[in-house]
Image (spheres, rainbow, N blue to C red):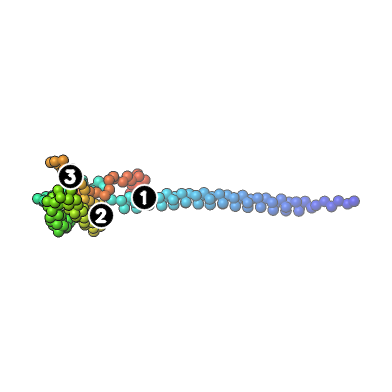
């Protein structure tokens, strides 16, 4: 039997091809690894940049509660009070609201509330007097019309104050509300128009946001 021995030149060619293929595979793996690192770094940087920009936008959109005034209570200044609701509120501009709202706007808002009281409260007083005269005969039921009318007047004032809030005061970070509280001079209750800030705390800004703002 004759055995055919391969040519040594063929072995050299095979070894060279294998070495070239291994080198190409190593280069491809290195390129893939570098591309993945860059993608992760770019993604992390993009994510942090987006988060910082979102935080900056939110911090810029949030108002400044520290600039808001202290709560102001506008008390009744009329000579008639029905179930704690006076027939007139004081239109004097509080000094703590200086620079926060125009005195003309404040006076206009209170004047509208006083107009609502002037229109509705006299009718309530008449029904209250009639209810008192007939109290014994009706076992107190004659006071119900005055109670219901006074409640309707309060609802009208609350709707008017809400309209004022949507018109102007919410844009300034303020809010009107009709509240019930104890009188300062007696144990009786009274209704006051309170004007206070919508926001209660100063938003905290991370130092990285300050750094981003300074760089921008």
Could you say which is closer to the camera, residue 178 or residue 189?
A: 189
Instruction: Confirm or deny contact between disc 2 and disc 3 (CB under 8 A).
Output: no
* Structural crowding at the residue carrying mark 2, measured as other residues with C-alpha within 10 Å and reported as few (<14), some (14–19) or many (≥20): some
User: Residue drawn at (71%, 50%), measured in percent from left and top?
Assistant: 15
Residue placed under numbered mark 3 in the picture: 189
- Please state the horizontal and vertical placement of residue 129, each as a whole percent of the image: 12, 52
Mark number for residue 55? 1
Circle 3 or circle 1, nearest the eye: 3
Secondary structure category for the residue under label 2: loop
* Structural crowding at the residue carrying mark 1, measured as other residues with C-alpha within 10 Å and reported as few (<14), some (14–19) or many (≥20): some
Horizontal side, residue 4 vs residue 28: left or right: right
Horizontal side, residue 165 vs residue 127: left or right: right
- Please state the horizontal and vertical placement of residue 16, each as a whole percent of the image: 70, 52
Secondary structure category for the residue under label 1: helix
Residue placed under numbered mark 2 in the picture: 170
Q: How far apart are marks 3 and 1 (CA)?
A: 46 Å
Q: Distance between the residues labelled 2 and 3?
A: 28 Å
User: Residue drawn at (26%, 49%), measured in percent from left and top?
Assistant: 198
Instruction: Confirm or deny contact between disc 3 and disc 1 (CB under 8 A).
Output: no
Could you say which is closer to the camera, residue 63 or residue 159?
A: 159
Mark number for residue 118? none
User: Residue drawn at (25%, 52%), measured in percent from left and top?
Assistant: 173
Res. 125 visible in picture: no
């Amino acid at each position: 039997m004759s055995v055919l021995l391969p040519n040594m030149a063929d072995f050299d060619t095979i070894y060279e091809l294998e070495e070239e293929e291994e080198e190409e595979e190593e280069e491809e793996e290195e390129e893939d690894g570098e591309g993945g690192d860059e993608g992760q770094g770019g993604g992390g940087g993009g994510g942090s940049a987006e988060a910082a920009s979102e935080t900056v936008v939110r911090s810029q959109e949030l108002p400044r509660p520290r600039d808001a005034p202290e709560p102001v209570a506008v008390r009744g200044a009329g000579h008639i009070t029905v179930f704690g609701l006076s027939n007139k509120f004081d239109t004097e501009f509080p000094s703590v609201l200086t620079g926060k709202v125009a005195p003309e706007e404040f006076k206009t808002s209170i004047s509208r509330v006083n107009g609502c009281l002037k229109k509705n409260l006299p009718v309530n007083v008449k029904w209250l007097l009639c209810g008192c005269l007939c109290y014994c005969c009706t076992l107190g039921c004659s006071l119900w019309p005055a109670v219901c009318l006074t409640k309707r007047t309060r609802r009208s004032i609350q709707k008017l104050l809400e309209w004022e809030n949507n018109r102007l005061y919410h844009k300034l970070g303020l809010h009107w509300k009709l509240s019930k509280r104890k009188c300062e001079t007696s144990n009786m209750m009274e209704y006051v128009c309170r004007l206070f800030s919508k926001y209660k705390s100063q938003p905290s800004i991370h130092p990285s946001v300050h750094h981003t703002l300074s760089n921008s």
